[in-house]
Image (tube, helix red, strand yellow):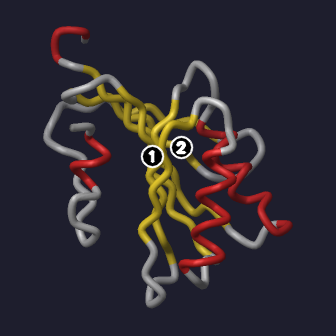
């Protein structure tokens, strides 16, 4: 079971497991979003971006469009979005291959939809690796 499937087991919870983390900050060249990079121990090796997004108004059109645009990027293997119409900010968890696509591309893709209809407020990229490979 991947970390993402464990995390989305209950929509009300966004837990990224217990582990040691190293935090590096970098900026998105195309946007004003700070990207926090964290390294954690996980069951499988994978990289997951957690993007907080404002501007989504409905689950059918907005969430579907954001998910489709993320899936269309090379290197993205999974894009799950937690949407709640009462929230002003929603969350996308995107599993991707950082050797194929960068977090900055995920952000700029979301922000380009509908000429800026959606705004990425924050981004955390968690690089999971089994203990033996660290």
Q: Are marks 1 and 2 in contact (CB under 8 Å)?
A: yes
Q: Residue furthest right?
A: 115
Q: Position of residue 103 (x, y in %)?
A: 59, 38
Q: Residue at x 66, y 32 (%)?
A: 74
Q: What secondary structure is found at the residue carrying circle 2?
A: strand
| Image quadrant where one finds the C terminus | top left
How many marks are shown on the rendered structure?
A: 2
Q: Residue at x 44, y 90 (%)?
A: 86
Q: Residue at x 52, y 26 (%)?
A: 97
- Vertical side of 109 occupied by 23: above or below: above
Q: Position of residue 92 (x, y in %)?
A: 48, 58
Examine the image and state in which quarter residue 110 appears. Answer: bottom right
Label 2 crowd bin: few (<14), some (14–19), many (20+), radius 10 Å: many
Residue under label 1:
124
Q: Closer to the camera, 78 or 98?
A: 78
Examine the image and state in which quarter residue 39 appears. Answer: top left
Task: Point out the tag, 1 or 2, that comes first from the N-terminus.
Answer: 2
- Mark 1–mark 2 Cα distance, whole angstroms, equals 6 Å
In the picture, measured across the screen, residue 38 lies left or right of residue 129, that is right
Q: Is residue 36 visible?
A: no
Q: Residue furthest top?
A: 133
Residue under label 2:
35
Q: Position of residue 130 (x, y in %)?
A: 21, 19
Q: Which mark is drawn over residue 49? A: none
In the picture, measured across the screen, residue 63 lies left or right of residue 38, that is right
Q: Residue furthest bottom?
A: 86
| Image quadrant where one finds the N terminus | top left
In the picture, measured across the screen, residue 89 lies left or right of residue 32, that is left
Q: Position of residue 21 (x, y in %)?
A: 26, 32
Q: Residue at x 51, y 82 (%)?
A: 88
- Vertical side of 71 occupied by 42: above or below: above
Q: What secondary structure is found at the residue carrying circle 1?
A: strand
């Amino acid at each position: 079971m991947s970390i993402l499937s464990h995390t989305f087991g209950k929509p009300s919870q966004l837990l990224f497991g217990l582990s040691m983390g190293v935090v590096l900050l970098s900026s998105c060249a195309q946007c004003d979003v700070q990207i926090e990079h964290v390294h954690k121990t996980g069951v499988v090796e994978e990289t997951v971006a957690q993007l907080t997004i404002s501007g989504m108004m409905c689950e059918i059109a907005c969430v579907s469009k954001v998910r489709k645009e993320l899936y269309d990027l090379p290197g993205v293997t999974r894009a799950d979005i937690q949407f709640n119409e009462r929230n002003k900010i929603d969350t996308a968890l995107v599993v991707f291959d950082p050797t194929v696509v960068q977090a900055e591309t995920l952000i700029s893709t979301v922000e380009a939809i509908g000429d800026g209809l959606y705004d990425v407020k924050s981004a955390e990229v968690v690089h999971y690796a089994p203990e033996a490979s660290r």
